[in-house]
Image (spheres, helix red, strand yellow):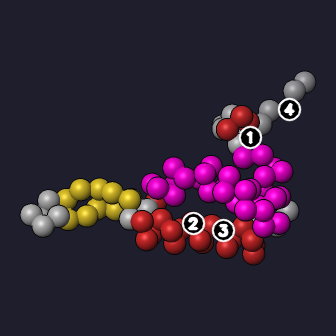
Amino acid sequence: MRKQSRSRIPESQLLPFETIVAAKAGDPDALSAVLKHFRGYINLKATRDFYDENGLIYSGIDPELKQRLEIKMITRIMQRFAI
């Protein structure tokens, strides 16, 4: 009998374990791959409402917040991620 995965995410969409290990070791290409993998989530979390000069509201990605989230993710991978 085949073991059922607990994740609903297809295995083809998961980040390879080797990439995670390489990112933890500081490989710049692996870190870039991790950031690319989580780009959509980071963009979602960095989206906020902006007001133009007429007082109209529009949503957009805050580049400063996006950069802070990316730096925080890299820091967490390098310091706290246990393999």
Dot 3 lies on which element?
helix
Principal secondary structure, stretch drawn in magenta? helix
Dot 1 lies on which element?
loop
User: From which residue to which does the magenta span run?
Assistant: 15-44
Disc 3 and disc 2 in contact, CB within 8 angstroms? yes
Q: Which residue is mark 3?
A: 74
Give yes or no for residue 21 being in the magenta stretch: yes
Q: Which quadrant would residue 20 be assigned to in this image?
A: bottom right
Give the numbered dot on residue 6: 1
Whichever of callouts 3 and 4 sits on the residue coming sooner in the sequence is 4
Q: At x 43% / y 71%, what residue is drawn?
A: 64
Mark 4 to mark 1: distance in Å?
9 Å
Q: Which residue is mark 4?
A: 3
Q: Residue 83: image x %, image y %? A: 85, 62
Mark 1 to mark 2: distance in Å?
28 Å
Nearer the observer: mark 1 or 3; the answer is 3
Q: Residue 29: image x %, image y %? A: 73, 56
Q: Amino acid at mark 2?
A: Glu
Q: Amino acid at mark 3?
A: Ile
